[in-house]
Amino acid sequence: MPFKVTLGNILRALELGADTLAYVSGSWSCRFGYYRRLQADICRELGYRFRLLELRRDRMKEIIREILQLSDNSLLRATGRAWRAFRLGWFKATTLEKAYELSRQVLPQAENKQECRRLLRTVIAEIETAEKVRELKQIRDRLTTRFARVRRNGRGSVLRVKLIGESYCTIEPFVNFDLINRLGEMEVWVDPFLTGPRWLGFHGFRLRKGEVRRAQRLAKSYWQYCVGGEDANSVGHLIMAARAGYDGVIHVHPFACRPSTVVQPALAAASRDYNIPLLSISLDEHTAEAGFLTRVEAFVSLLERRRRSSFKTGGEVYVPDQGE
């Protein structure tokens, strides 16, 4: 994980008629950048035929050449198609980001949790079927009003938890057992340090660089050298969460992810020094949903008890053993 999950997504897309696979690839320390070759070989051995488009900075000329070939070598046509596709995709991503953000805020205080989740599913379906930017702007403009109509339970403040870790485990609800919504139903507001559009914005276009630099600067006291993935970002965002008054931090990562594993002592040290509870969970294909949720529920109970009693742990925090 996430190799098998992403391979399954690719096979499903090919079965639905996709004829081009676009990979965000590279030669960095995270193994995700090397999936492209092996996954493409597996798909071809299974008999699928497709065009492979590898997106990486050192292949810009090849990317432009391949895009031109898709448009009969017409620069004007290729530019127009690329711009329209990018603009529509970007508006879909940002509209979806706003919908998820509003859902994360409203769900913990919603009187009827299913009402909020139904609204989110409806909005996602509208975004998926929208084919014009104008339609997406209309959807986005009405989002705040639509979520504001969800009835609140009037219970005031809720627990606030920061979600950090490996990017795919943080973003993909299928992998993390829909953790954000599960916590929302427990009346916990979750703030993921990374979402799909944020990942694309940073890694693809270097947006939000100031926030990333701040996180990595804060992490320096505990993590001098970047091993790969989101190791330094996770440490930095844990410290930022502690300073912002969050109640706790949850760290999720694949079982075999080297950067997320070796950063554990740094996370534990920062958690202890900043007096913020930390739950770290490794995920793989054998992770049982019941056991996963039991640990999450126990962590939430700890946070609730901690807030009720205003008890300060004096440096002792909950950092589960990875072997649990």
Image (cartoon, rainbow, N blue to C red):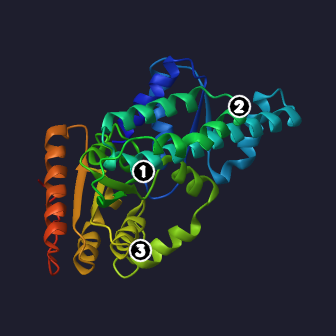
Front-most of 240 and 226? Answer: 240
Which residue is at a point 14% across and 57% down the rendered structure image? 301
Q: Is residue 230 above or below residue 178?
A: below
Q: Earlier in the sequence, mark 3 or mark 1?
A: 1
Q: Position of residue 228 (x, y in %)?
A: 42, 62
- Is disc 3 placed on a helix, strand or loop? loop
Q: What residue is shown with label 3? A: 225
Residue 31 disc label: 1
Front-most of 19 and 213? Answer: 213
Q: Mark 3 or mark 2, which is nearer to you?
A: 2
Residue 132 disc label: 2
Residue type, numbered disc 3: Tyr
Examine the image and state in which quarter residue 141 appears. top right
Neighbor class of circle 1 (other Cα within 10 Å; few <14, some 14-19, many 20+) is some
Q: Earlier in the sequence, mark 1 or mark 2?
A: 1
- Is disc 2 placed on a helix, strand or loop? loop
State whether residue 40 appears in this view: no
